[in-house]
Image: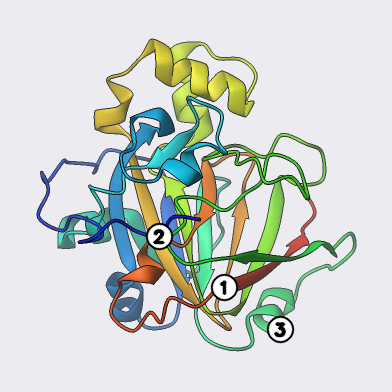
């Protein structure tokens, strides 16, 4: 599998404004730690990506991926807009990022665990990958940024077990995208069609990237938020050793 082209992500690219999205990253722990792990990029169709030929061959031709040349740390204004401490009820468009050990215990505390169960085993990924989700379990084909439409998969907890993994989240929720376009069925294929019809979305919908280390986790309504995993920054980010990462998932009640 190709690793990152020489030079890695571009931290001096055009400072596109992505501050109009409705997705929030809620966090436990030190806000400075979250801010240091938060990057943003444009979205783009994978067939326009240059330098990742072996990866591209695995994707549907118009799958959505983060633009690897546009990754940069979020600005202070973007961090203020897209993050908030976890101190109250959450919305389906919120993603809760748990920092540090004890993620599972903190997530279960005081909550009805009926219906919670592990699924999918452990997902492994090499460093330098644009996205990590297969189209089907055991299939090397990549889905790209997507929506979880299958029943029972729409609300989940993900826990990073080893290495470094990025959680990729589009800045605009599914509801916001389909409401403005009349798109009725929140399926990944329809999502790709929406971006084909409205290419201007590639300049207005950003892709947030939150780095998770071993022991970190996240909870999200992945049927309401365009998302995927990634390990692109793991190959070059300070402190990243380029080692494979692993993550496991638990289904939560919808």
Near-viewer residue (199 or 83): 199
- Label 3 or label 2, whichever lies nearer to me, is 2
Label 2 packing within 10 angstroms: few (<14), some (14-19), many (20+): some
Provide the residue designation for mark 3. Answer: 105
Relative horizontal placement of residue 40, taking residue 64 as reference (left or right): left
In the rendered view, tell whether residue 220 sits above or below residue 63. below
Q: Residue 76: image x %, image y %?
A: 16, 62
Label 1 packing within 10 angstroms: few (<14), some (14-19), many (20+): many
In the rendered view, tell whether residue 147 sits above or below residue 162. above
In which quadrant of the rendered view does residue 190 lie? top right
Near-viewer residue (86 or 201): 201
Res. 81 visible in picture = yes
Res. 180 visible in picture = no
Provide the residue designation for mark 2. Answer: 3
Find the distance from the CA under tag 1 to the CA under tag 3.
22 Å
Label 3 packing within 10 angstroms: few (<14), some (14-19), many (20+): few
| Residue visible at 63% across and 80% down in the picture | 103
Provide the residue designation for mark 1. Answer: 245
| Residue visible at 23% across and 59% down in the picture | 74
Q: Residue 56: image x %, image y %?
A: 47, 38
Numbered circles on residues, count: 3
SS state under label 1: strand
In the rendered view, tell whether residue 237 sits above or below residue 44. below
| Residue visible at 57% across and 39% down in the picture | 58
- Label 1 or label 2, whichever lies nearer to me, is 2
Question: Pointers 3 and 2 in contact (CB under 8 A)?
Answer: no
């Amino acid at each position: 599998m190709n690793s990152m082209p020489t030079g890695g992500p571009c931290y001096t690219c055009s400072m596109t404004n992505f501050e109009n999205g409705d997705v929030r990253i809620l966090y436990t722990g030190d806000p400075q730690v979250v801010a240091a792990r938060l990057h943003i990029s444009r979205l783009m169709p994978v067939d326009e990506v240059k330098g990742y030929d072996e990866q591209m061959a695995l994707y549907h031709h118009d799958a959505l991926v983060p633009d690897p040349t546009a990754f940069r740390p979020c600005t202070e204004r973007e961090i203020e807009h897209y993050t908030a401490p976890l101190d109250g009820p959450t919305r389906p468009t919120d993603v809760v990022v748990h920092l540090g050990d004890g993620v599972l215990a903190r997530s279960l505390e005081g909550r009805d665990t009926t219906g919670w169960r592990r699924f999918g085993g452990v997902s492994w990924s090499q460093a330098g990958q644009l996205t990590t989700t297969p189209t089907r379990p055991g299939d090397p084909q990549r889905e790209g940024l997507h929506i979880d439409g299958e029943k029972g998969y729409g609300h989940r907890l993900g826990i990073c077990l080893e290495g470094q993994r990025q959680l990729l989240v589009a800045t605009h929720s599914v509801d916001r995208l389909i409401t403005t376009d009349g798109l009725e069925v929140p399926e990944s294929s329809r999502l790709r069609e929406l971006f084909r019809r409205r290419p201007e979305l590639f300049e207005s919908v950003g892709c947030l990237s939150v780095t998770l280390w071993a022991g970190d986790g996240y909870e999200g309504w992945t049927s309401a938020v365009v998302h995927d995993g990634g390990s692109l920054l793991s190959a070059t980010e300070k402190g990243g050793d380029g080692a494979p990462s692993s993550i496991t998932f638990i289904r939560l009640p919808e």
